[in-house]
Image: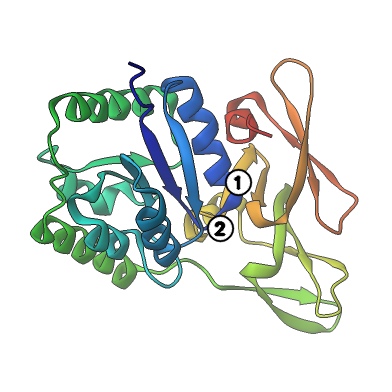
Amino acid sequence: MNTPRPTALIADDEPLLRDELAFLLAQAWPALEVVARARNGREAIELHEAHRPDVCFLDVQMPGLSGIDAARAIGAGAHLVFVTAFDQYALKAFEHGVLDYLVKPVEPARLAQAVARVQARLRSAQPSQATDALLAQLAEALARRDEAGAPLRWIRAGVGQQVRMIPVDAIAFLRSDEKYTLVAWRGDDGQPAEALIVTPLKTLLGQLDARRFVQVHRSCVVNLEAVSHVTRGLNETAQLHLKGRTEMLPVSRSFTHLFKQM
């Protein structure tokens, strides 16, 4: 008799990050079949009901219903692994090892540890232990993070004789340019626009939403939503092609793991 393959659901509001996790899981757990991919907590609940996967990998913070909300609805229906960009705020909720978690960007070694624990629980038929108290503790920790400082939403820049308020959502990339930082964004007319600001790239990186903005080179940070496709280069390097722009951004070897699935 053939043993059925274990199945999984991945929930993340970023398509690239869903694909990346699926790619890494294929390496760490070849027998696992990813049967569903959700864009938010509501989809995660609906797809869990439809597919009944053994494991759910849930991004903690998603628009609408969060990963925590989805976990409350799924309950003991699957083994849960949370994915978070805010480890310093979430660690206390995981410190007893009852709930497992991964920190973005997901590292293969850490994923292998999580996979080993889930596999052990599946073998022992141990139910999920995502209790309401632990989920409430995690929600409280993330609420404290929000109070401490939400991600940056606007960047102020001088453009000609005007001072522009550039919405962070419209930014394609930021790049160090000698003493300045180049901000490249989509203008009100949908056309590419650029401006120089004096705020260092390193300072901006600490204020941006880590779920969307990733460093791809020591001098460049890109918005994942602006990426069209990736061209692989020599020596584990790559180039990013952007939607609606002609620039190609280099990806250094330290960051190519973010785009290997492409």
Report the residue at 20% width, 58% height from top: 138
Comes first in the chain, label 2 or label 1: 1
Label 2 crowding class (10 Å Cα cut-off): few <14, some 14-19, many 20+? some
Q: Quick one: which residue is furthest to the bottom in this view? A: 162
Q: Nearer the viewer, residue 26 or 242?
A: 26
Q: Quick one: which residue is furthest to the right in this view? A: 246
165 relative position to 56: left or right: right
Q: Which mark is residue 16?
A: 1
Residue 235 position by quadrant: top right
Q: Nearer the viewer, residue 231 or 248?
A: 231
Report the residue at 12% width, 55% height from top: 134
Report the residue at 37% width, 50% height from top: 58
Element marked by disc 2: helix
Q: Amino acid at mark 2?
A: Leu
* Marks 2 and 1 close (CB-CB < 8 Å): no
On the question of residue 178 being in view, the answer is no
- In the image, is residue 35 above or below residue 93? above
Q: Which residue is mark 2?
A: 204
**How far is the residue under mark 2 from the one under mark 1?**
22 Å
126 relative position to 196: left or right: left
Residue 238 position by quadrant: top right
Q: Total label count?
A: 2
Report the residue at 30% width, 72% height from top: 147
Q: Nearer the viewer, residue 190 or 179?
A: 190
Label 1 crowding class (10 Å Cα cut-off): few <14, some 14-19, many 20+? some
Element marked by disc 1: helix
Q: Where in the figure is residue 52, as x and y percent of width and height? A: 34, 48
For discs 2 and 1, the disc positioned in front in the rendered view: 1
Q: Where in the figure is residue 93, as x and y percent of width and height? A: 16, 51
Q: Amino acid at mark 1?
A: Leu
Q: Where in the figure is residue 75, as x and y percent of width and height? A: 20, 55
